[in-house]
């Protein structure tokens, strides 16, 4: 996905979400993290979550996003790196991350989803946490080209290799003007220690 119109659309999204609070599911997941060595943010957007993770004293935060970095980040005593590339081009290091977060981002890459999902598992340390969402079949965007949606059975199959902390189906219609109908699964998953 290196389509300029697509990139511009994401940059507009990032302007809209700039300075927002860290995603609640990510905040929730932190209680399950066993170490704060390294965290990976896939689809890092306006870098709200990456800034939060650095403030939470992760030693290293790595961000991957198709767009240029939205802003400069003060890494404090940690290290921050930004990889401007599709998820599928990132060379996921083996058993590196204590936490991998993909907030509302993986469903936008249908073509490489399976490869990226496998890479996420491999790149977590044993005991590491994945947190993110998978969109499902009654979402308003169901069928959009380039996006991937999963039925409940497909979600259950995808999470099979992990220990489940949370798989919560969520479905609601926004009360805002665009009244979008959302249908997705919130996931917090742990890679087994064994
Ligand atoms: C809906 S936004 C979510 C951003 C942020 N995680 C948040 O919660 O606000 C999706 C993000 O994923 C990025 N993205 C979409 N497809 C991507 C891909 N194939 N590879 C890397 N980044 C991608 C977009 O540029 C955008 O920043």
Image: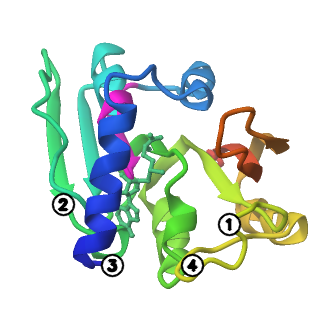
* Residue 71 sits inside the magenta stretch: no
78 left or right of 89 in image: left
Residue 155, percent from left and from top: 79, 64
In front of the other: label 3 or label 2? 3
Residue at position x 39%, y 33% from top? 17
Which residue occupies the foreground of this view, 33 or 51? 51
Quadrant in the picture for residue 35: top left
139 left or right of 36 in image: right
Q: Quadrant of ligand 1?
A: bottom left
Q: Secondary structure at mark 4?
A: helix
Q: Which residue is mark 1?
A: 141
Q: Earlier in the sequence, mark 3 or mark 2?
A: 3
Q: Which residue is mark 2?
A: 84
Magenta region: which residues? 36-49
Q: Which residue is mark 3?
A: 1
Q: Earlier in the sequence, mark 1 or mark 2?
A: 2
């Amino acid at each position: 996905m290196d389509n300029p119109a697509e990139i511009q659309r994401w940059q507009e999204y990032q302007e809209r979400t700039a300075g927002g609070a860290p995603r609640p599911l990510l905040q929730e997941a932190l209680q399950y993290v066993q170490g704060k060595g390294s965290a990976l943010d896939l689809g890092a957007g306006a870098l709200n979550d990456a800034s939060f993770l650095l403030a939470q004293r992760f030693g290293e935060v790595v961000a991957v996003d198709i767009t240029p970095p939205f802003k400069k980040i003060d890494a404090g005593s940690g290290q921050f790196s930004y990889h401007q590339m599709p998820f599928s081009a990132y060379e996921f290091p083996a058993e590196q991350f204590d936490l991998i977060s993909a907030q509302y981002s993986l469903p936008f890459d249908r073509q490489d989803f399976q490869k990226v999902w496998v890479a996420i598992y491999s790149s977590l340390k044993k005991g590491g946490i994945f947190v993110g969402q998978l969109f499902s079949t009654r979402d308003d965007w169901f069928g959009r080209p380039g996006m991937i949606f999963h039925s409940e059975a497909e979600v259950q199959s995808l999470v099979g290799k992990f220990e489940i902390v949370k798989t919560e189906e969520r479905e609601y219609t926004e009360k805002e003007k665009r009244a979008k109908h959302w249908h997705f699964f919130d996931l917090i998953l742990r890679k087994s220690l064994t």
